[in-house]
Structures are given as C-alpha cells and as structure tokens.
Image (spheres, rainbow, N blue to C red):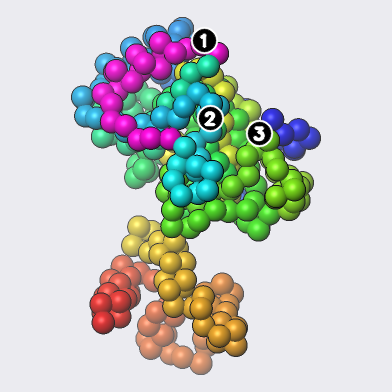
C-alpha cells in the first residue's frame, strides 16, 4: 500500500440529480459518495455475499462468461510473467452461477487463487439487471459492463472513454495519475497487454524504485480513492488508474462513453498508424510531421484563407466527412 498520496475530491450524492453535466465533463477524478447506495444489488450485498450472488443469478441467461484466474502466490495481481513473454494467469470459460459459487466458497480463506471477470456486457449476460440498477443520466451510454471476482490488483492503465465506475459489492481502491505522468509510469508493450490497454510495469504493492526511479515523481501527482459499496467514481478519459478489489467478493458496474459523436474515429487507431508511418522516419521528417499535427490537430490554426465550402476535412467532422475519410484511409491502407 502506497502512503502519503492525496485523496480524490469527493461529492456527497443524495440523489441522481447530484450527478450534473459538469461532473460528467470534468477533467479531474471525482468520488461520487453514495451515488448508487439504493440499488437493489447494493442492498443485497449489504445483507450478505450470498444474497448478492443470488440476486445476480436471477438475471443470468446461461451464456458463458470468461474469467482470468491467477494462482494464490500472485496475491491477486493480474500481470505479465517474469520476462513479459506471457501472463501470470489463465483465461477460462465459466457459467456465471458456477463461478459465483466458487468465489463464495473461497471467501474468508487466507490463501486462494484470484478469480476476475472483467468488462462483461451486462445486457449480454444479465438482461434485466439494469431495469433495477441503473443511473438515469447514463442509461443510454453504449458500454455498460460488470466486473466480478475476489481480491485482485489491476495494473495502472488508461481508457479512451470517460468512465463512471460504481462499487456494488465489496470495497475498491483506485490510484490515479494524470495523463502527463505517462513517462513516469513505465508503460509496458503497446501490442501485448494483459487486458487490452497498455499497462504500467510497476508493482504498486512493492515498487522497485531502483528499476523504476521516475515512479517516485509519478507518486507526487497521484490521487487515491477508497470506495465502499454504493459509492462511485468519475474517471476522465486518459487518466491512468490502478484498481484494487479489496474484499473477498466484489462486484463493480461501470459506464463508458465519449463526449463526441460515435461517427468519429478511435484515437488509438491513429497512434497505431503513426507508429507504422511516422515513428521510424528520419528525425527531421518526424519534426516536420509534428508541426503538421500541431497546426491541424492539437492547436488548430484558423484557415481563414480558404473558403468554408472548400475546407473539406478542415471543417468540423460530420457523418458525411467521417465516411469520406474512412474511405480514403481504406483505399490508402489497401494499396
């Protein structure tokens, strides 16, 4: 456990009305204390772990779920193996009711394997759950997922989307870093990752400062959030977050969305294309492309010398232009 880290700012949410547009567009993390405390799932978990499991099971449609399983000696850390050639866990298919039974059977044991069901669509496996456990302002968000397991540690990573994560059962700790701490977090491979996103190689429980000395600087900018069942946290897009499930049975529900239209492309695709097209150019050419990106993308300069009807992709991107750009890219990539 890292100490002397500043706490995330928190807001006491007495009703859903406290979840304002300003919060959902914030650029800093915010604890939303008590936001979902009235959810039936939360209340079932406060009664008992078995009650929470029974409540979930009543919505289960018998589709398989996929879990990561790590041996007891990994102490809940889902990560790479020692030389980053593979991972320290296996992926297995389960029936959700059998998985819940297994997790509950291991509760209160001192040494158990870690079981972690991550980012599974609620609508896919638990149709009906959201009719009783949802946030009105986020009902129409396209990605709503459930996370289930016992004690676990997930390496610091970012999401392209904004995120509201709701602790339904158990307790969780989030340790967060602003995007500019990228260099101080010692990020692992971009194209071989434990769970889809590039992740920090630092073990937050036992940081190796000899190997990762700049992590000390990252800690100076870190924020921590301790959440109980019924609490939620807003995590802005691109903020790094390390997530610990602290109880022997945990359930989390989260909402992901972007603040722009669905017609816009994924920034991650741009990074991959830039690695393919720009990274290995001579330095002078990379510098020239940096200037072009700054001029047209990151600090766009008004192109008043071009008539509006002739600006093309320099105008705000709408559905039609998005389709044209995708067609241009497909033609270029397929040559």
Where 44 sits versus 165, above or below?
Answer: above
Tell me the CA gap for discs 3 and 2.
12 Å
For residue 256, the mark is: none
Q: Which residue is mark 2?
A: 74
User: How would you rate the neighbour count of disc 2 (Cα within 10 Å): few for under 14, some for 14-19, many for 20 or more?
Assistant: some
Q: Which residues are magenta?
A: 89-110
Q: Residue at x 46, y 22 (%)?
A: 113
Tell me which numbered mark, 3 or 2, is placed earlier along the sequence: 2
Q: Is residue 93 magenta?
A: yes
Q: Residue furthest left?
A: 62
Q: For mark 3, give the secondary structure.
A: loop
Q: Residue at x 38, y 88 (%)?
A: 310
Tell which tag, 3 or 2, sits nearer the viewer: 2
Tell me the CA gap for discs 2 and 1.
17 Å
Tell me the CA gap for discs 3 and 1.
21 Å
Image location (x, y in percent) of residue 315: 42, 78
Q: For mark 2, give the secondary structure.
A: helix
Q: Is residue 244 magenta?
A: no
Q: Which residue is mark 3?
A: 205
Q: Nearer the viewer, residue 129 or 247?
A: 247
Image location (x, y in percent) of residue 330: 27, 74
In the shown orientation, is residue 274 left or right of residue 95? Answer: right
Residue 299 appears anywhere in the view: yes
In the shown orientation, is residue 67 left or right of residue 176? Answer: left
Q: Residue at x 29, y 18 (%)?
A: 97
* Proximity of marks 3 and 1: CB atoms separated by less than 8 Å: no
């Amino acid at each position: 456990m890292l100490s002397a880290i500043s706490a995330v700012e928190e807001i006491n949410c007495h009703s859903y009305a406290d979840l304002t547009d300003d919060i959902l567009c914030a650029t800093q993390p915010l604890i939303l204390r008590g936001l979902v405390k009235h959810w039936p799932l939360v209340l079932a978990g406060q009664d008992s772990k078995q009650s929470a499991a029974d409540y979930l099971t009543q919505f289960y449609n018998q589709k398989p779920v996929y879990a990561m399983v790590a041996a007891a000696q990994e102490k809940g850390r889902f990560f790479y193996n020692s030389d980053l050639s593979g991972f320290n866990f296996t992926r297995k298919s389960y029936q959700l009711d059998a998985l819940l039974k297994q997790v509950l059977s291991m509760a209160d044991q001192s040494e158990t394997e870690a079981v972690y069901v991550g980012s599974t669509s609620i609508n896919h496996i638990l149709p009906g759950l959201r009719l009783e456990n949802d946030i009105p302002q986020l009902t129409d968000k396209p990605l709503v997922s459930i996370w289930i397991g016992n004690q676990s540690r997930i390496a610091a990573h970012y999401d392209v989307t904004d995120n509201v994560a709701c602790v339904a059962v158990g307790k969780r700790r989030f340790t967060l870093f602003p995007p500019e701490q990228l260099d101080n977090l010692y990020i692992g491979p971009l194209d071989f990752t434990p769970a889809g996103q590039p992740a920090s190689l630092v073990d937050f429980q036992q940081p190796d400062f000899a190997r990762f000395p700049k992590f000390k600087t990252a800690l100076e900018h870190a924020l921590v959030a301790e959440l109980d069942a019924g609490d939620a946290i807003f995590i802005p897009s691109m903020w790094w977050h390390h997530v610990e499930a602290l109880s022997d049975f945990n359930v989390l529900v989260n909402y992901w969305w972007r603040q722009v239209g669905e017609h816009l492309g994924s920034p991650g695709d741009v990074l991959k294309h830039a690695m393919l097209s720009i990274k290995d150019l001579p330095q002078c050419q990379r510098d020239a492309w940096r200037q072009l990106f700054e001029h047209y993308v990151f600090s766009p300069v008004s192109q008043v010398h071009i008539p509006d009807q002739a600006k093309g992709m320099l105008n705000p991107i709408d559905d039609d232009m998005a389709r044209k750009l995708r067609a241009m890219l497909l033609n270029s990539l397929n040559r």
